[in-house]
Amino acid sequence: MTSSPTPLMRLDVISIFPDYLSPLSLSLVGKAIASGLVGLGVHDLRDWTHDRHRTVDDTPYGGGAGMVMKPEPWGEALDAVLDDDTEGTTLVVPTPSGVPYTQSLAAELATRKRLVFACGRYEGIDARVMTHFRDRVDTQEISLGDYVLNGGEVAALAIIESVVRLLPGVIGNPESLVEESHSPDLDGLLEYPVFTKPLEWRGLTVPDVLVSGHHARISAWRREQAEQLTSDRHPPAV
Ligand code: JBK
C-alpha cells in the first residue's frame, strides 16, 4: 500500500476500553489508516489518573443510581490530545442526550481536519468537562439513537465509519457514493429492495419488472417500493 504524506483527517479516541476501538484497523477504515489518508490515535483515559486504583468515576452529586466520570482525568486527557490551535477540530462526545446523528452531520464532520472522540461510560461525564472545552474547541454531543449502550465506544465506531467513507479517495467504488448523494427523486426515502442472481431461490423469484428491461417501469417500481417502505417503517416524525 502506498503512503500519503499528509493525512486528510486526524482521529483521536479517548476511552477506558481502548481495545473496543480495534475494529478501526479492519476494512475500509483500516485501509484508510494504513495508507496514511487518515491518522488515528487511541488513548486510555486511565493514563491521566494519578491514584493507585486509576479511578475515573465517582458517585453523582444530588444522588441517584450509577457513577459519573470524574472531570480531572478528562481535563488532562483532552489538554494532552488537543493542540493549542483547535481550528478545524471538533470534539465529539457520544451521549444518549446528544443531538440525533444524521448523514448531514456525518458530511459536516467529514469537512473537519481533526475529530477527537471522548467516550464516556457509566452515567456519563461530569458536565463541566463539556462546559469547559466548549469554550476552547467546537464541541458536539451526539446521539446515535434512543437506546441504552454501555458507553460511547460503539457510537464512536459508527460515527467514524460514516465520516471516513465520505473522505475523498477513501471509498473503493466512488459510484456508490455518487448514487447515494445524487438520486434526487429518492432523497429522504428508504432504499428499495434489491435482488441478484439466481432468478429463483428457495421458491422465491425476482419481481418480473426488474428483468423486463423497461427502465422507466423499473424506476417507477423502485420509487413505489421506497415510498411504501418509508411510510411503513420510517414515517416523518411530525
Ligand atoms: C448511547 O450515542 N449514543 O446513542 C449513546 C452513547 C453513549 C451511551 C448511550 O447509551 N445511546
Image (cartoon, helix red, strand yellow):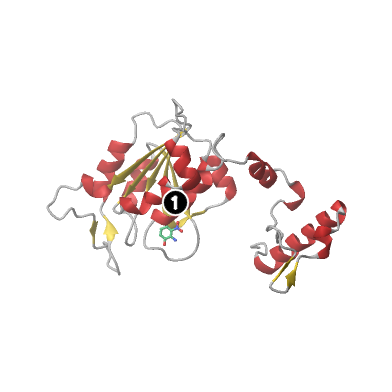
Residue 232, placed above or below residue 195: below
Q: Residues within 10 Å of mark 1 (few under 14, many from 20)?
A: some
* Residue 114 is at least partly visible in this image: no
Who is closer to the viewer here, 52 or 97?
52
Image side of residue 235 versus residue 48, left or right? right
Outermost residue toward the bottom in this view: 203
Q: In which image quadrant can residue 205 be found?
A: bottom right
Compared with 166, 95 (above or below) is below
In the image, residue 162 sits, relative to residue 192, either above or below, namely above
- Which residue is rendered at x = 48% and y = 49% of the image? 159
Residue at point 73% right, 60% down? 226
- The percent position of residue 46, horizontal first and vertical second, equals 23, 49
For residue 9, side relative to residue 59 (left or right) = right
Say which of 25 and 233 sits in front.
25
Residue 180 position, x and y percent, is 67, 47
Q: Is residue 144 visible?
A: yes
Taking the view exactly as shown, the residue that stands out farthest to the top is 5
Corner quadrant of residue 222: bottom right
| Residue receiving disc 1 | 157
Residue type at the position of mark 1: Leu
Q: Tell me the quadrant of ligand 1.
A: bottom left
Q: Residue 82 placed where, x, y %?
A: 34, 36
Q: Is residue 11 left or right of residue 19?
A: right
Q: Residue at x 79, y 65 (%)?
A: 207
Q: Residue 169 location in percent, x, y?
A: 56, 34
